[in-house]
Amino acid sequence: MISLNDITATEKTREDLSSNGIKLSEVNYNNLNNILKRQKIKLGNHSLRQWNKFKRKKDYKILLDHINELYMLGYGSKFIALCLSLKYRIFISHTLIHNKINNKIKSRMVYSLDEKMFKKANCILMGRTIYAKSANSFYLTFKCLNIRNFSKLKRIGVKVFYNDNCDKIFVKRDDRSAKRINTHDEGGLFISLYPLPKKIKETLRNTKTSYNSIPIKIYLDSKDFGFKREELIDDKDARILYPELKEFGFSLLKNRTTNMSRSKGDLVVFKNNSRIVIEITNLGAKEYVKNKQVRDHNYRDKLIGKIIRIKTINENSLPIFIFNETVSGPIINKDFKKIIDKYRINIILTNFKKDWEMDVAKKIDDLLKFK
């Protein structure tokens, strides 16, 4: 099996080659050994007779398996040749690797279509596939705060799989992979998509602009990234509240959409066959402003917008809105109360101070008992 150490050692040697002006396509027995001197590594160089003898050994079958493994991890023939040269301490030409790939190995797309992988998922994120026309490149982008923070600390490699209908993606962590999770300054996560099913590729390329994107569901197993499912809930207050709700018997759906659209609230939980959509907002927290009337008017509009949108989209659910208690006076006026009465809104007020989540969780449980 190819180890992460094999990959990192190859990347280090590639950097050394590059710093000496040597491209991977220009690597030969002599210049590679010159670079490896400082690591006290000396590669052998098999003659044709020695290669033929090696092919009859069990190690040759293992070598072919390693070529296949590296290829499925997304590496090209030049990188594979360098990696296996270091692993076997024998100079291996990238031409040999290229020929083996062309003659013996299935396309990466064959391995990337795997319906069974989706059975391992316990989370669903909403993301987008992107086509950048200028670079003729395809990407997957999504947001998940904990995975983003984790990716900034260490290298996170992944494999990407597609279902038969090509309408969802499974992201499997494998730090050896050539595909990495890259972070963007604005909070997004990006993964290069190659290979890409023809169906998705043609849809993305069907544009007259320089950029196109389509929404897609991203499946993953949170344990791959070292997290429990509830730790991938995006909203900070929702992550604080859920453990208390769990004590009252509320649960997340197995395939939980952790990065949700604004129309689905900050948290969706289930109990006794009831689906509860929870929207949490700290708007109205005390702060100094010159014109409190304008501030309160803006807050009122935002809260009413949230209520109407979430109530309308989630007809078969019980929406609960958790607001800062400071909105009860200046913001929840007569007009606001008419909206509450018309849409039969459940509002829980809290101060978001110590142990607020315990009090709110009990009130949510009490609300469900009387519904």
Image: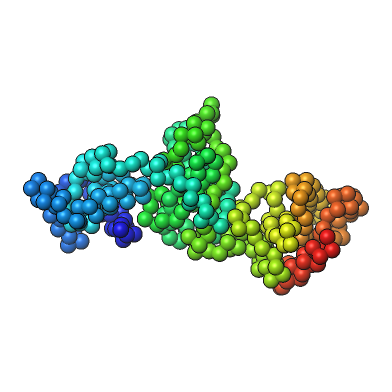
Check the image and report above or below for 136 versus 122.
above
Residue 239, horizontal then vertical, whole percent: 64, 63
Residue 114 % position (x, y): 46, 46
Numbered disc total: 0
Q: Residue at horizontal 71%, vertical 48%? A: 263
Q: Position of residue 44 (x, y in %)?
A: 12, 54
Can the viewer see residue 12?
A: no
Q: Is residue 65 left or right of residue 187?
A: left
Residue closest to the far right: 334
Q: Residue furthest bottom?
A: 354
Can residue 225 be seen at all in this image of the molecule? yes
Q: In this rendered view, identify the residue nearer to me: 237 or 157.
A: 157
Q: Residue at x 11, y 51 (%)?
A: 53
Q: Quadrant of residue 94?
A: top left
Residue occupying the point 87% across, 60% down:
329
- Residue 255 position, x and y percent, is 60, 55
Left of 249 or right of it: where is 73?
left
Q: Nearer the viewer, residue 136 or 174?
A: 174
Residue 350 in the figure: left or right of residue 141: right
Image quadrant holding the C terminus, namely: bottom right
Q: Depth check: give the residue in front, 271 or 266.
A: 271
